[in-house]
Image (spheres, rainbow, N blue to C red):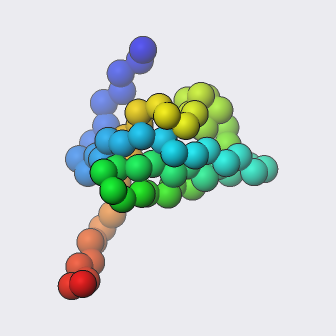
Amino acid sequence: MVVRRLSGRNQLVGRIESVQISGLMAEVVVSIGDQQITSIITARSAREMNLKPGQTAAALIKATEVMILRV
């Protein structure tokens, strides 16, 4: 396994629920606790990482701001 160092600090580890590849893009849904995060990545990246449901994966979030909504 190749370990890559990243500057992203907002990393949420969860389990891949689904991977849907369509054309040049792939939709990856990751469950983290009782929440889900959906990410759109390139189909090539999904294939190179051999992403499959049930695997452990980390969602890395890079944002210039985070908004809060009281619910």
Q: Residue 11 in the image: state x and y as whole percent.
A: 28, 46
From this viewpoint, which residue is outermost toward the top?
1
Q: Residue 30 in the image: state x and y as whole percent.
A: 45, 48
Q: Residue 69 in the image: state x and y as whole percent.
A: 25, 83
Q: Is residue 22 left or right of residue 10?
A: right
Q: Is residue 56 left or right of residue 48?
A: left
From this viewpoint, which residue is outermost toward the bottom?
70
Q: Residue 35 in the image: state x and y as whole percent.
A: 36, 59
**Quadrant location, the N terminus:** top left
Residue in view at x 61 percent, y 44 percent? 19
| Nearer to the camera, 54 or 57 | 54
Residue 71, by quadrant, is: bottom left
- Above or below — where is 53 with respect to 64? above
Looking at the image, can residue 58 be seen?
A: yes
Q: Is residue 47 left or right of residue 4?
A: right
Residue in view at x 33 percent, y 63 percent? 63
Residue in view at x 33 percent, y 56 percent? 34
